[in-house]
Amino acid sequence: MKQSGKFWGGWSVLALLALGGTAMAQEPAAAPSTGGNGFKVGSGRLHPYFELETRLDSGVGYFAGPGVDPATGGVSPDLSGEFAMHFRPGFRLEVPSSKLALNLAGNLDYVLYTGLMTSNSGTASHLEGAADLLARLNPDAPLSLELSDQFARSDRTRTVAIGAGVLSLFNEARVKVPWKPGGGAIELAPSAAYAVEFFEPLGALSPVDCTDGTCNPLTADQFDYGNLHFGLEGRWRFLPKTAVVLDTGVDLRSYFNGGSPDATVLRALAGVAGLVSPKIAVTAKAGWGQNFAAGGSGTFLAQLEGTYLYSPTLSFKAGYLRTMEPVAAYGVFTDNRGYGEVRALFGGKLTMRAGGSVDFLSFTAERSDTVINLDIGPEYQFRPWLTGAAGYMLGSRSSSVTGGGLNYSRHEGYARLSVTY
């Protein structure tokens, strides 16, 4: 089933427990953190911005070589590189209120493949975008309501079983009811969400040696899915800066085109989160995950994360996460993930950051993948309304399944200039 030309989202939430809880990384709408006065909207401000980004990308998609007809060429030996331009207008709206607080960020991103490195890539130029909405009703009351939505269209899919060269359209709508009985020492937050993701190929070819449907971008739309999630988060602050935390949820995953087995995945974790010292914060949780669908299995889950605030301008974070999630083609997968990040601020204007992760993915049917990600670079605030950034990103993947779409290294260098009012 192909996605419609227009997609309407609902509501979702982007809030986490104040003292713990780390989810799988996703891609919310990016918005510059600085700007001028903006436009006054009620008690808040609207900040429009524009970003111009140049990106040298070694793995855009699969395209026919010079003089090759895509209709008859069949396959491509490697991911094609390209020099791309991103034209990204957007806005950020923040309206604080004790009755109805609103946060909204969004952008449109036109990705222009210049054809300087791959002659036939220009036909794959496309529109991307992202939007995040969070509405909080009575946010300071013991019982409040949060409604939000996250939307993203990009070449970074959330479905880890699928290979490279795929464009993803994702939306998640969520409702959450935070409840703080008895003065706030205990917090409970039941939630419900519904997400969909649709896929389409970026190029016109499939990779050579592709023996599995997950590595062929031309057939990725068979994995379009809907995911219904029910969750409960809890926290009991038994000391001023330490709490017992609870994170439970169940995902009901179904696929629109019958390309994958459905899954019903229950996860439950409990642990502690808080400050070990004035500069060190730790979260430690353990639990169990179980797939109740046909042929289901269970596994141990865990998270251990530490943050070290060396100084007000230098911080370190590192952690380990083991989780089970529903996934296309295989039903479920298990991820053992190690990650780390360091951030430093110099002179109040120059920010240096470096982050990386290694994921060991285990699927059913004896498939296993290793995914390595690295993102490093500086950002400098020239003026309150003008910010520049540059960086390098590495995405490397190796799989026990053969095929170019699942075995590759993607190098990206970028430079970005942001103007914000």
Image (cartoon, rainbow, N blue to C red):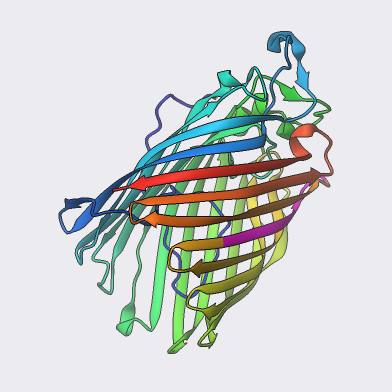
Residue appearing at x 60%, y 71% in the figure:
317
Residue appearing at x 49%, y 48% in the figure:
228
Please, is residue 24 above or below residue 118 in the view? below
Q: Is residue 364 magenta?
A: yes
Please, is residue 242 above or below residue 249 in the view? below
Span colored in magenta: 353-365
Residue appearing at x 38%, y 84% in the figure:
185
Instruction: Locate the N terminus and report the quarter of the image it occupies.
Output: top right
| Residue 353 shown left or right of residue 213 in the figure | left
| Residue 366 shown left or right of residue 28 in the figure | right
Most foreground residue, 316 or 14: 316
Would residue 227 be seen by someone viewing this image from the given angle? yes
Identify the residue at the far left of this view. 42
| Residue 318 shown left or right of residue 185 in the figure | right
* Quadrant in which residue 277 is drawn: bottom right
Q: Main secondary structure of the magenta part?
A: strand
| Residue 285 x, y percent position in the rendering | 61, 74
| Residue 420 x, y percent position in the rendering | 33, 48
Please, is residue 295 above or below residue 225 in the view? below
| Residue 253 shown left or right of residue 388 in the figure | right
* Quadrant in which residue 272 is drawn: bottom right
| Residue 391 x, y percent position in the rendering | 59, 50
Please, is residue 3 above or below residue 134 in the view? above
Residue appearing at x 61%, y 65% in the figure:
341
| Residue 106 x, y percent position in the rendering | 37, 44
Q: Is residue 411 magenta?
A: no
